[in-house]
Amino acid sequence: MRDYSVQNKKAWEYSAYEFWVKNSGTPAERAKKDLENPLGALKRYADYFDSYAGLRIANICGSCGKKAIPLALLGADVTVFDISEENKKYAVETAEAAGVDIHYEVGDVLDIDMEKYGGFFDVVFMEGGILHYFHDIGEFMRTMYSLQKQGGKMICSDFHPFTKIKDILSLEQPAMNYFSTDIFEGEMAHARFFEEEIRSQMPKCLYRKYTISEIINSVINCGFTLEKFDEHPAWTNEKIPGEFTLVAVK
């Protein structure tokens, strides 16, 4: 595992299960919400899926299963790839409470077993701000390409690159030169929700933020055909972009 992945893993396994219970409810409580409206739980991402039943979906950095479980409830065969055992514990318990099966592989996404998963998935799906955890976006996109069947689709939604120059989403991340290629140390995503005493003790993550052109070119250069690139308003201010979703086909 890469050095930065080791550090990020420490951060994402620090009280993560406790955080999900506090903010999303117990696994049983979360499962009840997912069962009530799995399609609604997908939010805007439902617009990017043509169907669900029988699809093999790789949910990259799928965290606590907040999208994997609704997808499974809709009939998909979902495998989550994530770095945190704490995330897995919450996701698996929630899936059991919801009465569905999900597969969950813990480890560095860039070290996925391609003998087992190469060319296996109909859809590779990710959301919620994950690209900045990987320091070579070309290597990351090549891995995504390798996971997919011929004709398969990648749905990649992430924080808008404009968040490099302004804390648009109020994530309390530092602003920088838009064209900076620096690696920087920052708090993990949930740190701001903890009391200061705990927050100050939490391990940091190592981030690398990308420009729009770096993201798009990495998709094209590894062999994907880019079909769509949508920009979405920030949840803090609908007048500025906060997220994007791109769709690419192998």
Image (cartoon, rainbow, N blue to C red):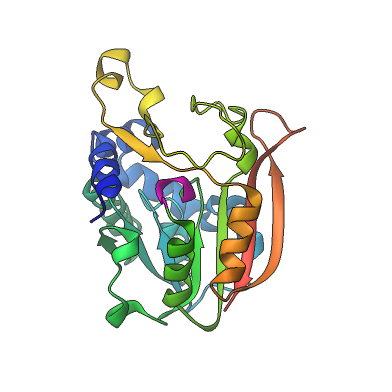
Residue drawn at point x = 26 percent, y = 14 percent: 197
- Image label count: 0
Residue 81 in the image, given as x and y percentages of width and height? 34, 61
Prevailing secondary structure of the magenta residues = helix
Is residue 1 shown above or below 74?
above
Residue 121 in the image, given as x and y percentages of width and height? 44, 77
Residue 159 in the image, given as x and y percentages of width and height? 57, 43
Range of magenta residues: 131-135
Residue drawn at point x = 45 percent, y = 47 percent: 33
Quadrant containing the N terminus in the rendered view: bottom left
Left or right of residue 26: residue 157: right
Q: Is residue 3 visible?
A: yes
Residue 34 in the image, given as x and y percentages of width and height? 45, 52
142 within the magenta span: no
Rendering quarter of residue 179:
top right
Residue drawn at point x = 43 percent, y = 55 percent: 136
Quadrant containing the C terminus in the rendered view: bottom right
Residue, far top? 197
Residue, far bottom? 150
Q: Is residue 99 visible?
A: no
Is residue 9 shown above or below 170?
below
Left or right of residue 35: residue 220: right
Which residue is nearer to you in this view: 120 or 89?
A: 120
Which residue is nearer to you in this view: 245 or 141?
A: 141
Rendering quarter of residue 180:
top right
Residue drawn at point x = 26 percent, y = 53 percent: 2
